[in-house]
Amino acid sequence: MLTEFEAYLQMHGLPGEAIHRISGLATRRTLRRNEFLFRTGEICRHKVFVLKGLLRTYNTTPDGNEHILQFSPEHSWTLDVESYDRQVPSLAGIGAIEHSELLLWHKPDFNTLLAEVPQLKIFADQLIARNVHQSRHRILTALSATPEEKYEDFVRTFPGLLSRLPLRMIASYLGISLKTLNRVRHAQLQRS
Amino acid sequence: MLTEFEAYLQMHGLPGEAIHRISGLATRRTLRRNEFLFRTGEICRHKVFVLKGLLRTYNTTPDGNEHILQFSPEHSWTLDVESYDRQVPSLAGIGAIEHSELLLWHKPDFNTLLAEVPQLKIFADQLIARNVHQSRHRILTALSATPEEKYEDFVRTFPGLLSRLPLRMIASYLGISLKTLNRVRHAQLQRS
DNA sequence: TAAAAAAGAGGTCATTTGACATCATTTTCA
DNA sequence: TGAAAATGATGTCAAATGACCTCTTTTTTA
């Protein structure tokens, strides 16, 4: 029987043997709601696949405001790029919004896999490409969209997350205040 | 004798034979000031290296506002990721701010190089990683920084570009109005 | 289950920001 | 070189936004 993760890899075209090797080096971890995988200042040592639950990558500004860079629901990958790549203390932290189950790979192990399993390298490159596209889109939205457009874009892009997130986190992700988010939502109700 | 581009590749650790193959497939192109490499709606067919000059990647919103996603000065690479990767009409355009000289590679040619010159693939991966870091940083700045902080960050990050760009383009890059940019600059003068 | 904490709705108000317009200066290019 | 275009500085004003506050409801947890 395949685990859920193995089915995920199979669905993305990886052959059985590759799947076996990748799974073999993973360790499992559970995070309770509001628990952290690591906080600002710690080093991001693992590549992370989210089996179940929902994580957030956040950054805290000097004045104490928290900004959410990314939500990572089930079947997504996450890490703090900068900290992982260079193994330096992170500026961002990752925490669980819901009770979550993760698979972790130590960086050296994952690098070994990338070097020895060509299909994994190809798949990882695809994920990075998608990430680059999404970043572009997010930058453009942040630059040019009104709060209303940002919210509509969020709803369109992550329809499934809307009901799982407190509004203040959506506001934090969009870079607007909770007040403004409420105004947008209220205006939309008026119109419909 | 090495061309400037070949020296650039050598400086980044690529061996002579690889450099030769990469150069061999490039074509040159000159853009005059305000000329476009391609506009919104066209397909981005080339990978681009800027030998001299300065390009901008911009996006025009439905209401006619232009937003600058990226400046590409000499010795940087550029393209419209989405359009290049999938060979679909671009949402962004690329144009010359200054008279510029470029090297272009057709996508199939560059893919051949990536497949056959392992050092190029490694180098390209490094460039992508840097791009991902920069995107993160830009997203965070867009979300959390005040106009003043955005401008200071710009000056810190691209000290050399400041004098080469009209202020309205800097404002467009930062996602603030020219008016606000002027206010910020004026406030800084007051203080110093 | 009861107390505590978090979430969120909404009011008020000061501030920031952008839209629009004008004018002087600089740059471009025919 | 001289006309035309672009640049950018600045004023005015209205609108958008966030900070701060209170109150209610929901959720968490001890």
Image (cartoon, coloured by chain):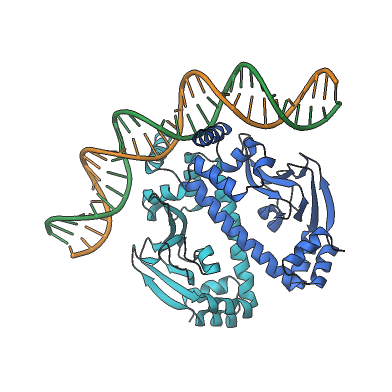
Chain colours: A blue, B cyan, C orange, D green
Displayed quadrant of residue C24: top left
Q: Is residue B3 left or right of residue A185?
A: left
- In x, y percent, where is residue C14? 46, 22
Displayed quadrant of residue B68: bottom left
Nearer to the camera, B9 or A29: A29
- In x, y percent, where is residue C3? 81, 18
Nearer to the camera, B77 or B187: B77
Depicted B16 relative to depicted A2: above or below: below
Q: How many marks?
A: 0
**Does residue B6 appear anywhere in the picture?**
yes
- In x, y percent, where is residue B146? 50, 39
Q: Is residue A102 left or right of residue B172?
A: right
- In x, y percent, where is residue A109? 80, 63
Q: Residue at x 80, y 55 (%)?
A: A103
Work out which residue is located at the far front of the displayed protein and give it: A192
Q: Residue at x 75, y 70 (%)?
A: A14
Nearer to the camera, A127 or A66: A127
**Does residue B129 appear anywhere in the picture?**
no
Depicted B58 relative to depicted B142: above or below: below
Q: Residue at x 64, y 61 (%)?
A: A128
Nearer to the camera, A183 or D1: A183
Q: Is residue A135 left or right of residue B40?
A: right
Quadrant of the image containing the C terminus of chain B: top left
Q: Is residue B38 left or right of residue A172?
A: left
